[in-house]
Image (cartoon, grey):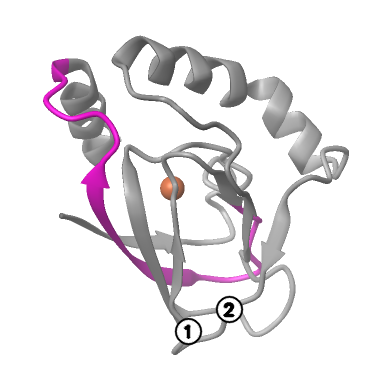
Amino acid sequence: MYIVIRCVKKIDKKRSFDVHFDNYKNTFLLPIKIPPIEPKGQFFIWENTRNGINGVLSHIFSKLFYQNFITRFLVRNNILKIFKRINCDIGDIIHFNGFNSLHYNENVSSERRSILIHSNRGIKNSSIINLSEKLSQIF
Ligand SMILES: [Fe+2]
């Protein structure tokens, strides 16, 4: 299990529209602070973007294919309309498969805080995945 407290402020522009897959198949998202006015940093998901990923290479190649500046540009400019907006308030819990489903948060007008609980790694016992997770904890 991997638990993250995600805090994003208006100046954290690199964190918004950061389209990505998680390393885990189960994620629970619990918002604990939401901006009172739009944009509220709401969650967007393209469910089951990829399926059948069971090896490190296919995982890495699909991440390179989807997680890049082109996808971010298309999302940021509302061109890629396949993502579904999930409205959630404080007290709600969202469960999703972040390993198979591409997802991101929009920008925020003020601070947003969430708790993310991840479990069930999609790729087990991979030193590359372990290293990327350690790096993401630092940066
Ligand atoms: Fe994620």
The circle on residue 92 is 1
- Kindly indicate the quadrant of the structure image that contains residue 37: bottom right
| Residue at the disc numbered 2 | 88
Q: Are marks 2 and 1 in contact (CB under 8 Å)?
A: yes
**Image point (51%, 37%), residue name:** 20
Q: Amino acid at mark 1?
A: Asp
Mark 2: C-beta under 8 Å from nearest atom of ligand 1: no
| 99 vs 106: above or below | above
**Image point (25%, 29%), residue name:** 123
Residue 3 is covered by the magenta coloring: no
Looking at the image, residue 89 sits to the left or right of residue 27; the answer is: right
**Image point (58%, 78%), residue name:** 88
Looking at the image, the residue that sits furthest to the right is 79
Q: Position of residue 80 (x, y in %)?
A: 82, 38
Q: Amino acid at mark 2?
A: Cys
- Kindly indicate the quadrant of the structure image that contains residue 23: top left
Q: Which residues are magenta?
A: 105-127
- Kindly indicate the quadrant of the structure image that contains residue 40: bottom right
Q: Position of residue 96 (x, y in %)?
A: 46, 58
Nearer to me, 90 or 53: 53
Secondary element at tag 1: loop
Looking at the image, residue 40 sits to the left or right of residue 33; the answer is: right
Mark 1: C-beta under 8 Å from nearest atom of ligand 1: no
Q: Position of residue 121 (x, y in %)?
A: 24, 40
Callout 2 crowding tier (Cα within 10 Å): few <14, some 14–19, many ≥20? some
Nearer to me, 12 or 58: 58
Looking at the image, the residue that sits furthest to the bottom is 91
